[in-house]
Amino acid sequence: MNESRTWESLSKVDRFVRIHFLFFTCLWPLLGAISVKPDLSIGELSALMVAALAYHLYAFVLNDVIDLPIDRTQPLRQQDPLVSGAITPAQALLLACVQPVVAVMPTLWLGGDVRAYAALVVAFVAMAVYNVWGKRCPVPPFTDFMQGVGWGSLGIYAAFALGFEPNAVTWLVFAYAVAYTLFMNGIHGGLRDLANDFARGARTTAIFLGARPAPDHRDPHVPAGVIVFASAALIAQIAIAVTLIVRNDFGYGPAVYTVTAAAAAALGAASLALMPIVMKPYAGAWDLAFRLQIYLVLMILPILFIGAANTAALALASLLKALSLAPLEWTIRIPQWLAGKTGLAGQTGLAAKTGLAGKTGLAGKTEFDQGPS
């Protein structure tokens, strides 16, 4: 009973502030910081994470307020605090609007110059552009691009806030954030919400490229344009990773170089192998492949930074990963499963309570989900 109550409480908080996305949000300033100063202090890391948390709340809460009319028609969002009425739009909007001010405080503490504040402005404005016009823009790839600029600018901000000029690695982090967002939000998010978005007249990249839901909500039409766009975005991310490996800016020795390059290559190859399944929504193992692919692609970049990060940065990344996993039902169920108390596919296990069953629970609300959509 206590476990159930804990899970329900954590789930409600997660549905509002997206705890499971903390790792995603904090990844960009963390990698941006490592790109210019691998030996980060705990104080510097803490300040950067305060700014990242402010941006995180701003991005997700503002998106939910603006998309509330559409979310109210989405069956998977009925337990969200805004949709259920547990939190009013005015309360959520106030929380979102104070976050730019909050982000200024750690920037002051770090001694960031005007360029750091300019990068923050770009990040917040770019996300506002996406949140306001993301499903209304005649050319939705543009607003997906702007969302990517928002996330990527956090890496540029981190470099400036620490008193450094962004270098080639910093800009590659920025480029990866943009490409990942085009891939994640433009295609994965668009295909996941295709039926509801199309019915509500929303403009998404997938719909813009010709994707259409089927009358029975199964096997939607995914034209060549969607496949080409998704493939190009994925290949761009792999190309960025290859560039980082070839450049070896961190000066890795043979052992570290080989291990990180091999790990990144394996993740990239697995991501490419999943593409044919992902491009066939709702068929077979699509839901699992969908979530697994965006998770694998996200992990390619940080893998290449592990050898350069100090103990404090690695500990922070591990903590963020643990927090991201905490709201997931299977995180709670795995120990019970190992003890033989319950099965992952049972009525009280994973299939019944998460999106992997494709029917109820947290489908679209796990760590394998995308950002604002």
Image (spheres, grey):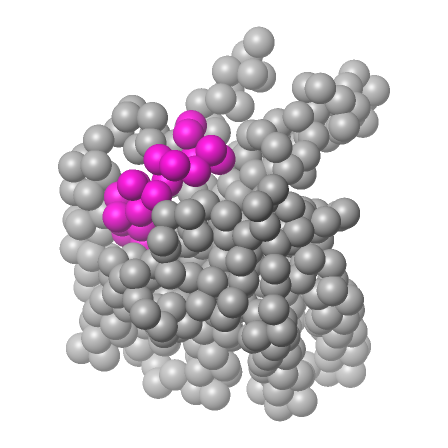
Residue 272 falls left or right of residue 194: right
Q: Position of residue 248 (x, y in %)?
A: 63, 86
Q: Position of residue 290 (x, y in %)?
A: 65, 54
Q: How many marks?
A: 0
The answer to whether residue 77 is magenta is yes
List the single residue furthest toward the bottom. Answer: 247
Q: Main secondary structure of the magenta part?
A: helix
Q: Nearer the viewer, residue 201 or 10?
A: 201
The answer to whether residue 9 is magenta is no
Q: Quadrant of the N terminus?
A: top right
Q: Which segment is the magenta one?
A: 55-79
The answer, for residue 309, to whether it is visible in the render is no
Q: Position of residue 97 (x, y in %)?
A: 18, 50
List the single residue furthest toward the front. Answer: 215
The answer, for residue 268, to whether it is visible in the render is yes
Q: Position of residue 163 (x, y in %)?
A: 30, 78
